[in-house]
Amino acid sequence: MMAILLSTLVLTRPRAAAVGSAVSRGAIAGVLRVRRHTTSLRTAIRMQQGSLVEAPPSRAGASPDLLTGAASAEGLHLLNSLTQTVEAFTPIDPRLVKWYVCGPTVYDSAHVGHARNYVAFDIVRRVLLDYFGFDLLYVMNITDIDDKIIVRTHYNHLESMAAEAVLATPKPGLRDLLEAQHVLAAAAEAAAVPLPVCDVQAAFLELTAAFEAEFFDDMARLNVLPPDAVTRVSDYVPEIIAYIETIRSNGYCYESRGSVYFDTEAFRNAPGKQYGKLDPAKAAAGQRAGAGADDEADDWTEGKSSAQLLAEGEGALSADAAADKRHPADFVLWKASKAGEPSWASPWGLGRPGWHIECSAMASDLLGSHVDLNAGGVDLKFPHHENQIAQAEAHFDCCSWVNYFLHSGHLRIEGLKMSKSLKNFITIDGALSQYSAAQLRFLFLLRRFSEPMEYSENTLAAAIATHKWGAEERTLHATLHSRRQAVHSALLDSIDTPTAFKALEQLLRATNVYMSEVPDVTRGFTLLTLVQRYFGRMFQVFGLPSLFADGGVGAGGAGAAGGGASAEQVALALSTFRDQLRQKAIAAVKAAKGAEGGAPDTALAEELLRLCDALRDDVLPQLGVQLDDRPSGVAQLQMRDPKVLTAEMEL
């Protein structure tokens, strides 16, 4: 098994880790330079928190203004994983929403499942920031101290030793045999307690810096906004130690053989404290009782029990720690380091932080004792986020540290979660070699961020169809361009409005043809929005903005001012009259065709049908009214609102 793992690593070597690559030197140097400025950045953020009293008022809650994006946030609701319900979003301080998102563990290349997670939260962030007008402080961590990183560092070193030995073999015919021997020897060595076979601190830092640089390069290519602040575990070891000491002084942890463990029983028994808020067993019970809020259940536990998830959360190098715990649910805050593992001095001896404590300490340092939003992939829900909550509440001795938890659903391939452990993942770099960043973003927009989704040729085809122009889209766009030129030429010619309106009518007809011939799921909505935006602009120029205002034709006119019927009521009455007229005309035509010798009113009935079609296709679309005839005989009425369509495009 170890030999297989080592051979797999050769196939999945990161592009950032290759010696001499563009990322491995320049980008790593950039990451290391950023590390040196971490202290000043944290100081600046703390100063910002201290001056919030003098901060300008937030735009959230202001009157809707789609030009600035400051739409009213009143009525905004979010699916809160803590309660499994959709709740009204109320920030602790309306002037600044504090948001912590769990970043990557940088030991390998990020895959499309990670892309879905960070693009999904990028979309939520943009909506809160640019549409609702909230001021945000968006903090992301980088986990650069972890068991997976230690294992990967040793694997890389052993693999390098084996490769050098093979290349140095004097007889090429023996290379395969020697390579197999070295791989087996490396596997046996790695299977034992890790040995100090390399300068682990230096190798550790080089590996994580390379993959961190690659991760942020991937995010930039995906058009994900950079975090307001980035925290790295290796920069926070002193703060993490102090954080643990506070938890210990509050009575919620204990030391055992150089490691420190969180005491879940002491926490459970404390007044107001609760452990298990995100336990999957609790969530399953709530869903059985009808309390679940997800539109589609996501079996994110993959059939694992809470005990199995807790054990996995302790790390691959801590399998022998169970005997040191007072209770099976207790989890490590500080790990005593073995030979060949990176270590830092602490009151309990040489060691390193546990996985869960990292996020609690770093989020608390920049966001304080109360946080609005905490987000991450659904696979972090338990035990990572559960333990993160418990640690912070034990540290601050409070009962509620985070108000809202957002979890992104799994990205699946053939029904299975995309993951490195299952070896069914596609790297972000690999995905971007086949699809554009916009196409991937369109794919992720097709589902709610909290729902699982399938990564397949069919789902990608739907996203590409939404984004990619075919022959029909090219034809409509060419018509839009030519009719715009025709309108412009007409207005240059002594303001020839009849010719200008004829060009607009031709564009309307072309748009109707496109809408009738192209199915809903494959229509280019961005192109249609361009068409509607152009009509809105021209009607504004001609002094007819009410045709494209809320409520449709006549909104804000004399009838509206006088308390008369709304535009939609008028359109509905007209549509109902047309339905009745059309049904009678169809019946008359059928009766005439069935009658012996025909009937004299056949021509009249057919003319009425032609007029009904002309009303639907030529007149009403220019007034912002869309009718779709259905087999039932009752047309579907839709009032088109250009403001809403423009806002949807900007999201």
Image: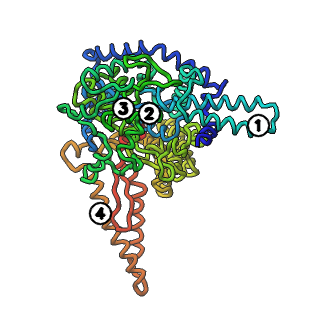
**Of the image marks 1 and 4, the number of the one nearer the N terminus:** 1
2 or 4: tag closer to the N-terminus: 2
Q: CA distance from mark 2 to mark 4?
A: 76 Å
- Which callout, 2 or 1, points at the residue further toward the start of the chain? 1
Within 10 Å of disc 3 (Cα), the crowding (few <14, some 14-19, many 20+) is some
Q: Where does the N terminus fall, quadrant-wise? A: top right
Distance between mark 3 and mark 1 Cα atoms = 46 Å
What amino acid type is highlighted by mark number 1?
Arg
Measured as percent of width and height from the top left, residue 9 is found at 61, 37
Which residue is drawn at the image coordinates 38% and 80% (left, top)? 591
Applied colour scheme: rainbow
Q: Earlier in the sequence, mark 4 or mark 3?
A: 3
Splitting the image into 4 quarters, where does residue 631 fall? Answer: bottom left
Q: Please give the residue where the numbered disc 1 appears in the rendered image.
A: 175
Can you give x and y, in whole percent of width and height, for residue 386 in the image? 32, 36
Q: Along the polypeptide, which appears first: circle 3 or circle 1?
A: 1
Marks 1 and 4 sit apart, C-alpha to C-alpha, by 87 Å
- The answer to whether residue 418 is visible is yes
Name the quadrant of the C terminus.
Answer: top left
Measured in 3D between alpha carbons, the distance from the residue under mark 2 to the one under mark 1, in whole angstroms, is: 36 Å
Amino acid type of the residue tagged 2 in the rendering: Ser
Q: To which residue does mark 2 refer?
A: 318
Mark 4 element type: helix
At x 62% / y 31%, what residue is drawn?
Answer: 15
Residue matched to label 3: 324
**Horizontal side of residue 588 vs 219, given as left or right:** left
Quadrant position of residue 558: top left
